[in-house]
Image: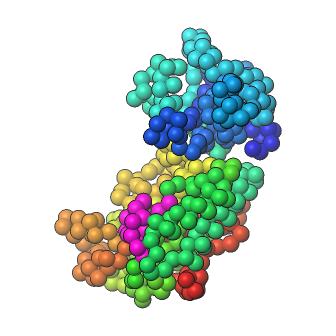
Amino acid sequence: MFSKDIYSKRRTELIRKVGNGVILLLGNSEAPCNYPSNTYKFRQDSSFLYYTGLNSPDLALIMDAESGKQILFGNDVDIDDIIWMGPQPSIGDFAESCGIEKSEPLSDLEIYVKTVMAQGRRIHFLPPYRNYNKILLNELTSIPVRELNAKASVELIKAVVEMRLVKEECEIAEIEKACEIGYAMHYTIMKMAKVGVKEQTLYGIMEGIAHSQGAMTSFATILSQNGETLHNLSHNQVLTEGRMLVIDAGAENEMNYCSDFTRTLPSSGKFTEQQKDIYRIVSTANNMGQSLSRPGVAYRDVHLNVCRLITQGLINLGIMKGNPDEAVAAGAHALFMPHGLGHNMGLDVHDMENLGEDYVGYDDSYKRSSQFGLSSLRMGKVLSAGNVVTVEPGIYFIPALIDKWRAENINTRFINFEELEKFRGFGGIRLEDDILITHNGCRRLGSKRLPITPEDVEEAMREN
């Protein structure tokens, strides 16, 4: 945990921003894996962590936005719990540790909420994503489960997003720690990947490093030679000569802050010339994305500039044709990069995605596009100092998507489908770094940068 003063100041600021009614923040509960007492590793709700630092299950926080009163709800353990778990802090101890003066049993939460609602006062809550909390909110408020997300408090969502988007120095230090673990994960695999090694072996080693140095991975590790599948979670192949391995993985440190890196490796340790041609476009795009990212610049504009660079690179190779500005405006480049340039990151690897990406990455000035590809950009609005975002351009050759566009004559003005056939089995390349927006630009997070040029990657893999 950070100091209790940090959490107290955050709660005070949240109360000020919301200004009325009662704020209810629910922590998470244990989630059964295959039977009730065999649970997944516990992960606390990120907003609950942000405002309390308490990383234990079955807690709830009430903040009266008018009186300022704060109550932590939870249960003390009994002797049966102590036998299996050992002595545990009391609910009063938890409250004191994060600067909350009052605590109550969890069973009193329903009485409190129903009393507030009977007074005609509003209960502000965030959109629930765990089924347990959906059921609990339904019991507390009588709002049907299917209506909970629609009736979540927009005022509370916007207040939380505004606070969590700008990282404090203590948070940046924790993200740096997560980046160090992420670096170790990726660089270890660079030294171990070679023809004949199983993807599953490399996956297991990466996961092990994350667990041994931090809390867990920050998301399900993507490690696959089928890199054309953007989020490929299958690890059932053996590294094969002539193919490439896309590794998108990050760590969550002990304070639950995240990192997220992607590198693409030649399975044999050496890129082919065709692979280098595409790789250099992506690495140049990655560097451009970072160079353009600074306060006052809309990340959508950074994304579009990167897309124009990628388009020009593909035109130079004869894969695309025409005017790059017109091609990007038409969305033709999305055949090769159907995702956004990056996303916010912090206590969540896709920071606050559960609150709604349109609140996190967009605002009244920047609305999400409906165009294929651009619609997948998670962060579009103007960058501010303290934002932490990823920069992850990619180029992919997805046979099913290529066939669909060709059959339906989509963007034929900009796509050279005959030349494209030479890349049908190519796979994909993605390169991702994590950056902090500073007052005059940005900087990469972590003390080192993972090898990024094809030459540096081959050098790192040379002795495998």
* Quadrant of the drawing holding the N terminus: top right
Q: In the rendered structure, does residue 223 fall within the stretch colored magenta?
A: yes
Q: In the rendered structure, does residue 141 fall within the stretch colored magenta?
A: no
Tell me the quarter of the picture where residue 19 sits. top right
The residue lying furthest to the front in this view is 83
Q: Residue at x 69, y 30 (%)?
A: 82
Residue closest to the eye, 15 or 365: 15
Whether residue 406 sits left or right of residue 33 in the image: it is left
Instruction: Kindly tell me whether residue 417 is visible in this rendering.
Output: yes
Across and down, in percent, residue 8 comes to 77, 35
Labels in figure, total: 0
In this view, 42 is above or below 300? above
Residue closest to the eye, 241 or 70: 241
Colour convention of the picture: rainbow
Across and down, in percent, residue 385 comes to 68, 56
- What span is in magenta? 221-239
Q: Residue at x 72, y 27 (%)?
A: 91
The residue lying furthest to the left in this view is 407
Instruction: Kindly tell me whether residue 380 is visible in this rendering.
Output: no
The residue lying furthest to the bottom in this view is 273
Tell me the quarter of the picture where residue 260 sits. bottom right
Q: Residue at x 40, y 55 (%)?
A: 375
Q: Residue at x 48, y 46 (%)?
A: 358
* Quadrant of the drawing holding the C terminus: bottom right
Across and down, in percent, residue 267 comes to 45, 79
Tell me the quarter of the picture where residue 47 sits. top right
Residue closest to the eye, 293 or 356: 356
Task: Name the main secondary structure of what is drawn in magenta.
Answer: loop
Residue closest to the eye, 36 or 366: 36
